[in-house]
Image: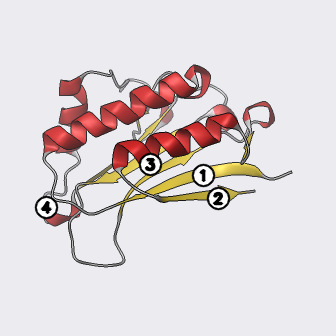
Amino acid sequence: MEYIEIIRGIIPKKNETTSYLTEKVLETLSGLRQIDNNLFENWYEQGGNKKEALRNKISFEYDNIEQLIKKNWDKKNSDLGCSFSLWTGNKIELSNTLISFRVGLISKNENLNNRIVISLPFLHKLRLTADSVIITDIQKLISTIWETSVIELDMF
């Protein structure tokens, strides 16, 4: 049986405001929590190490997400947008979920894309197959919120 390791949504390049992106990120995180509260309940900004990261819990408040986006916006080339990663901070590493956002990218470089990438847990009891309702719901969520039809699944 094949399990889903990664769900990747390729997001169209558009010149969007920080406000718009903040709303979309919030909508995504809230939607994931509604799909499966066990997998997506808490999020922490990744840090230099686990202890540091656990001090950076993300609250689902507009100002907090907007600050995260602004802090991670490329300072040298604003056309590259922002990139940041969050993880669930579970004690057992194999039960963690990771989500990475690359948003606000408008560079004409065809090799660069906006994207949302969700890495699912490796812990056996948390593994999901491609026909899982949770996987289908996540695909629908990403497709609807980010207006994309390109959703890729990596399996192991």
Name the mark on residue 143. Answer: 3
x 75%, y 56%: residue: 156
- Nearer to us: label 3 or label 4: 3
Q: Is residue 9 above or below residue 19?
A: below
User: Label 3 crowding class (10 Å Cα cut-off): few <14, some 14-19, many 20+?
Assistant: some
Alpha carbon separation for disc pair 3 and 2: 17 Å
Alpha carbon separation for disc pair 3 and 4: 25 Å
User: Label 4 crowding class (10 Å Cα cut-off): few <14, some 14-19, many 20+?
Assistant: few
Name the mark on residue 6. Answer: 1
Disc with the residue nearer the chain's start (3 vs 4): 4
Q: Amino acid at mark 4?
A: Ser
Q: Position of residue 104 (x, y in %)?
A: 22, 55
Disc with the residue nearer the chain's start (2 vs 4): 4
- Nearer to us: label 2 or label 4: 2
Name the mark on residue 78. Answer: 4
Q: Amino acid at mark 1?
A: Ile
Name the mark on residue 129. Answer: none
User: Label 2 crowding class (10 Å Cα cut-off): few <14, some 14-19, many 20+?
Assistant: few
Give 23 or 67, whichever is nearer the viewer.
23
Q: Position of residue 137 (x, y in %)?
A: 57, 37
Side of 11 where 38 appears, left or right: right
Disc with the residue nearer the chain's start (2 vs 1): 1
